[in-house]
Image (cartoon, rainbow, N blue to C red):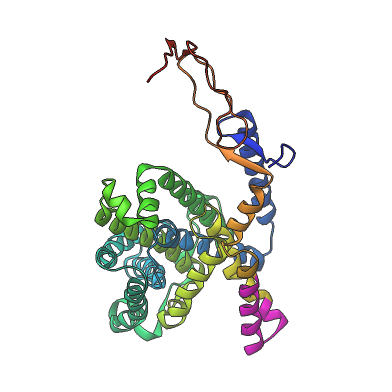
Amino acid sequence: MSERTRPYVVHRGTTTHRVMIGAGLILAAAFVLWARGFGQFNQGQITRVMIYAIAIAGLNIATGYTGLVSVGHSAFFGLGAYTTGVLVVSHGWKPEATIPVALFVCFVVGLVVGLPALRIRGLYLAIVTLAFGVAFPEVVARLSTITGGAEGLTIRRAMLQPPTWSGFAIGQKGKWLFWLSLFVLVVVMIVVHNLVRSRYGLALMAARDNELAAAASGINLATVKTVAFGVSGALTGVGGSLFAMYLGSLVANDSFTLLNAIALLTGLVIGGEGTRFGPILGGIAVVYIPYYTSDIGQGQAAAVLFGAVLILIMFIAPEGVAGGIGRLGRNVMVLVPATPKRPGGERSSARGLGGNSERPRRQGQSIGGEMATPTD
């Protein structure tokens, strides 16, 4: 590759990198300030995007980063929603106070559902999670004294009013939920970012890429897989909790069926598996693609258009939208780890991408304060 066609290299922690982060934060803040002035319907659509982005971020932990295919995350989504609904309706809890409870309940259930991953994987694991997702509406219907059964569970509007400390008026439920969903989404994105960059995150990706090599490296695959399913279910359950506040009426046979599980999985694939911002792009796809295709056609025509759009996206960017943008961006700019400092305090220079930029040292040249001597 010639010098002219080489992408621009940016090192983490440098001034250029900080300026890029600052510009991204400014653009995100500008969009949020712009979106807060939307009408009730459009602002509600943005809220739905954020809720689905949270749920897809949870699915991304299991499927994207760990390689555990799950087709039953609609059950975690519904479990989080019903946890909030039952606590608010039957026990008088404040809606926002139920979010940590939904997270904990879905984490525990996720640990249990993740146990089969210790023995099976691939298509067989997908079938197990599919059974979990299909069984959830039936379990909800059986527990009619708690969940309302097939008739559903209705959370009255008076129970979903903004808290007094939020500064929102009684009738500003939509605005309050918009800011609450935004706050939770930011927290979830930070948690996922730090998790993936940690030792545990490296263990997740090692188990995904090659289980035998990961086990040989000392990684406890049983702990990694089980905890991954627990964290995945917990984050998706948080999205379900917010969904209950947004919807106000919970009917398992309508909102938490296999179609919802497919929608979450579709959003993950479109956004980009194993990417930071793929869940947000997936949430946009889940909310807006059906909305605009239904405007163009009705009934079967809308379904055909929706499928055609999905096929087109996968044809253009098989690694997802976020992955496709990243692939194109790497032709222009590459972000690399910070250059380590030498013992003397100077940074080693680096020209090109990943290659040694310095010429071989001559005999007797100093390396880190010691004299280099030839070896046999």
Q: Quadrant of residue 175?
A: bottom right
Start-end of magenta stretch: 293-312
Q: Is residue 55 above or below residue 199?
A: below
Q: Quadrant of residue 89?
A: bottom left
Image spot of residue 96 (x, y percent): 43, 57
Would residue 33 be found to the left or right of residue 156 on screen?
Answer: right
Q: Quadrant of residue 150?
A: bottom left
Total number of numbered labels?
Answer: 0
Q: Is residue 266 above or below residue 373?
A: below
Residue farthest to the right?
Answer: 4
Q: Measuring 75% from the left and 39% from the top, which residue is drawn there? A: 4
Q: Measuring 45% from the left and 15% from the top, which residue is drawn there? A: 368
Image spot of residue 173 (x, y percent): 55, 62
For the N terminus, the image quarter is top right
Depth check: 278 or 166 in front? 278
Q: Measuring 51% from the left and 67% from the top, which residue is drawn there? A: 246
Image spot of residue 6 (x, y percent): 69, 40
Q: Which SS does the magenta portion mostly show? A: helix
